[in-house]
Amino acid sequence: MKRGVWQEPGNLAHVTRILNRCLQKGGVRVGETAVVSYSVHTIDPSCPSEVRVLKYADAGRVFYQRQQAGEVIHADVFHDVGHVDHRILANKIRQAVATYVSDSGSYHNPDIIADYIDIQTGTGGGRVTGSLTYGEGDKLRRAHMNHVHLTLSVPSDMTGVLLYLVSAVEQGILEQSRQIRAIERIVHQETRPQGEGDLSDYTSSSDSYLRGSTSDQDTDESRVHRMAMELIEEFETPQAVRSLLDALSAENSGHSMQQPDRSAIEHLKTRGLVRKDGFRYRLTREGEALREYLRLHQRELESQVRKLIRRLPGRIKGTGETKLRRGATRVKKSLRKKVALRTPGESEELAVVETLIQSAKRRVTGEGLRVQPEDIRIYRYDRRVPCDICLLLDASASMAGRRIRAAKYLARHLLLKSKDRVSVITFQENTVDIKVPFTRNYERAERGLSEIGPLGLTPMADGLMTAIGYIKKTRAKNPLLLLITDGIPTVALWSANPLADALKAAEEVGRSRLSFTCIGLEPNRLFLEELSRRTKGSLYTVEELEKESLARIFHREYTR
């Protein structure tokens, strides 16, 4: 298929169905270079263009000692003999998963999906989201000198991600000056031949989340864990998911707990977690198992969620991010250690390695390594003024769903990633609320964030003026005001014109000499550009408010 055609959501769903049918029958070739199946693949060196699919050797059982067959997909992408850096490919795979989730409109969390993908090449391997310091034994690396080995476990509605993974791996191979190699024939081997050796060359210990256990119970627990993490992504916190399931539990049938809203019910129905029982909805057996898992492991899940939030996303293609203006007033840079040439009389920390490198550059053959004064390099520090970050969030009705979750994610990310105080102010309908006063306390901020629910119109002028007043009242240090909005003002403050009032409030921001950045949607670019010009700040427009792009934009502004 031509690239660009199968990337459309409807075509992706169709391709996913075809892949699922093919995988049930045996091995399938994806493109010209990749073979995908639920089995182990081998190749005869005397016939390198032919791949054997060992249908008697389930990949999950052989590689990970899993109890059930057909749970782990095995993909091999073939290339000429040589080293292919698995770290470079792992980064491309993470990006490919995020792109697929965006293209397909999937509700799955790309970070969690990537957690269940492993890689092995001739340079090493491991979980693509892990340390990538495994699979470095000589025997194992030699066995993977001619192909990139991937294993993954994904929901059946995400099998289409294989197209993106193969494409990303092929690109990574070519960028490393290696040639991809076409597979001409696939042979399905139904039974184990007599005298065939073991498959230990293809196994190793690692940090994989795919590893099975000695009981079916542990395998089921792995599936429940992934379901829990995906629901947490949808409903923001483990406590929120647990409260949702509690309201639907049979244990609470005699209580007057209010049933969740329709959208939440539908989301749980698609996952087989709830059923209709008369006039009420009740948890299925799978839903009750998930509820019990959350009760027993809530602290562990909260810890894992924080790790995911803390992680700074890399560059993700396809976000449509456009920077339109850079203001003159900026936040002072954070404390950073950098290497610099030593100034006579200056007393600083010696950068030993960099000093030796400078000396080695001018070393004459036959002479020893001599350090001259001009070779000396030191560590110099950019001094830092503490920064108070005020997030001004549009919480109007149009922000419901993924948009408001992305904005809340940014607030949580800043609290975990930075060492500065964060506050959150929302504007919606006819009100502006300080949901989170300036704080470094994550739990305190979480209580305020949990109260934010999109509603009504967009009183932007009132929001800007309240933020200015709050920053001045609290005597915020080196403040940064960050506005996140998906629309234009619809509620006036002083006149009958909401847009004119918002621009007037923007002028007040500019006169207050606050550092200001706005992130908004591309259709509103002209108005937001004028707003940012009057604040003397920066503006970024994006196609959609996604958590990864919000975090990346903030860090770009914060560290430049």
Image (spheres, rainbow, N blue to C red):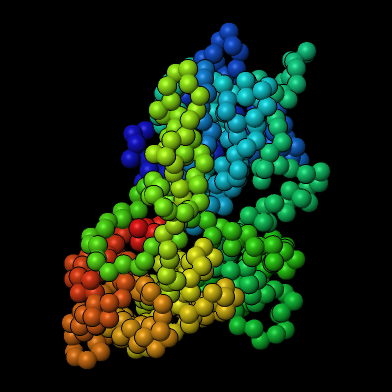
Rendering quarter of residue 25: top right
Rendering quarter of residue 531: bottom left
**Is residue 424 positioned above or below 413 on the image?**
below
Rendering quarter of residue 132: top right
Of residues 120 and 72, the one drawn nearer to the viewer in this rendering: 120
Q: Is residue 379 visible?
A: yes
Left or right, 455 with respect to 321, comes to right
Left or right, 502 with respect to 418, comes to left
Left or right, 47 with respect to 9, comes to right
Q: Residue furthest front?
A: 345
**Is residue 243 positioned above or below 3 on the image?**
below
Q: Residue 246: x and y, percent?
A: 67, 75
Image point (72%, 74%), residue name: 250
Q: Residue 366: x and y, percent?
A: 47, 17
Q: Residue furthest right?
A: 214
Of residues 478 and 188, the one drawn nearer to the viewer in this rendering: 478
Image point (45%, 48%), residue name: 378
User: Where does the N terminus fall, quadrant-wise?
Assistant: top left
**Is residue 543 positioned above or below 14 on the image?**
below
Q: Residue 306: x and y, percent?
A: 59, 63
User: Where does the C terminus fall, quadrant-wise?
Assistant: bottom left
